[in-house]
Image: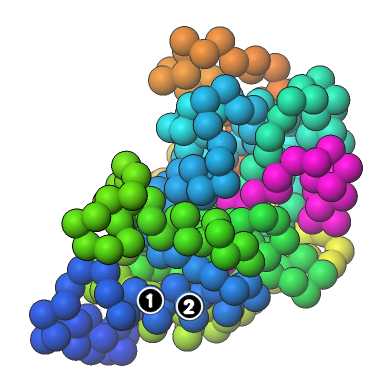
Amino acid sequence: MITIAKPTFDEKEIQAIQQVLDSGMLASGAITEEFQNHFARYIGVQYGVATSSGTTALEILLRAIGIGKGDKVITTPFSFIASTNCIVYVGGTPIFADIDPTTFNITPENVEQKLIENPDTKAILIVHLLGHPCDMDAFVALAKKYKVLLLEDSAQAHGATYKNKKAGSFGTAAAFSFYPTKNMTTSEGGIIVTDNQAIAEKAKLLINHGMQIRYYHNEIGYNYRMTNISAAIGLCQLEKLDKFNERRIQIAQYYDKNIQNPIITLPTVLPNVKHCYHQYCLLIHDGKRDAFVDHLTKNNIGHGIHYPITIPEQKCYEHFNFDTNFPIANQIKSQIVSIPVHPALTDDEIKTVAQVVNEFV
């Protein structure tokens, strides 16, 4: 089986974990602080606050900037559910805007329409889906025009750039995930990055039971800290991230050149963007997506459908009565399939994937 994802480790991570184990300091500490500082510098911002997951990073980001009960946040209907759950966790109200048919990202035009319809909106939470950054010039301008906060869910965009500036460095704050399938991992984990000191300090308080001094709790907080073990893995992975991404780009370029199938559309990369290819997604036309998935399965090619239904359609949100009329997102969900693009793939495996895709009739 050629897997859809595979974390890439070597002796360096093993030694780093062993050093933490030998130290006896397993919980959040100096190694975690070192990692969050290094990652913030990599993104190009001043502050990083490492957390237990990408989801907790998103939740704490919203809490730290003051999003609360009834506050409206515009976001995408086409993403992993955490990008909406975090709004619900803090008592906010998600407002959905449709996506672009080529990048699958939320569009500035659709967001502006929602801002006009909802003048009391507090924030825009964009998602750099699949590793392709959103149109950041337009979103920065929208946030300024309508006086709302701009937040970036960069969980799939480690190292991706827009006009040579890293995803996660444009808005008021951003969140990343380090889940094992991401472009780099800490096993589980996440991080908030920002240039705003007050947001960083608030986030640090909230992830640590509301404590600045041990056993003195300034407010109700959470145990959302990253461990030193995870951070040690993260430090090693961060050193390799650019190399990992370059390999992903090489694989994507091979697919771009060698996959030729008349019922398949390949990914689009817009000008001024560096796609980091968290996923390489195909669109399968003529109602053939299920047959294509069966074809991949029979040929032992790992795959994924990101995502089979939109967030507003999820059963857990039935009681919200969200609008589910998003023509582009509803079209894409029935066509999209991810194929392997992770850096552990061999050249022979890449050729096999392309060949199998081309053989589908």
Q: Is residue 151 magenta?
A: yes
* Residue 250 percent across, percent down from the top left: 64, 76
- Which one is in front, 280 or 257? 280
* Residue 251 percent across, percent down from the top left: 60, 72
The structure residue drawn at horizontal position 51% and vertical position 61%, both measured from the top left corner, is 200
The structure residue drawn at horizontal position 63% and vertical position 52%, both measured from the top left corner, is 152
Tell me the residue that label 2 is attached to. Answer: 37
* Residue 246 percent across, percent down from the top left: 61, 79
Magenta-drawn segment: 135-158
- Which one is in front, 147 or 110? 147
Q: Is residue 294 left or right of residue 42?
A: left
The structure residue drawn at horizontal position 56% and vertical position 37%, both measured from the top left corner, is 67
Quarter containing the C terminus: top right
CB of mark 1 within 8 Å of CB of mark 2?
yes
Is 245 drawn above or below residue 200 in the view shown?
below
Is 330 drawn above or below residue 337 in the view shown?
above
Mark linked to residue 33: 1
Is 70 drawn above or below residue 124 in the view shown?
above
Q: Is residue 179 left or right of residue 256?
A: left
For disc 2, the neighbor class at 10 Å (few under 14, some 14 to 19, many from 20) is some
- Kind of residue at disc 2: Asn
- Kind of residue at disc 1: Glu
Tell me the quarter of the picture where residue 214 sits.
bottom left
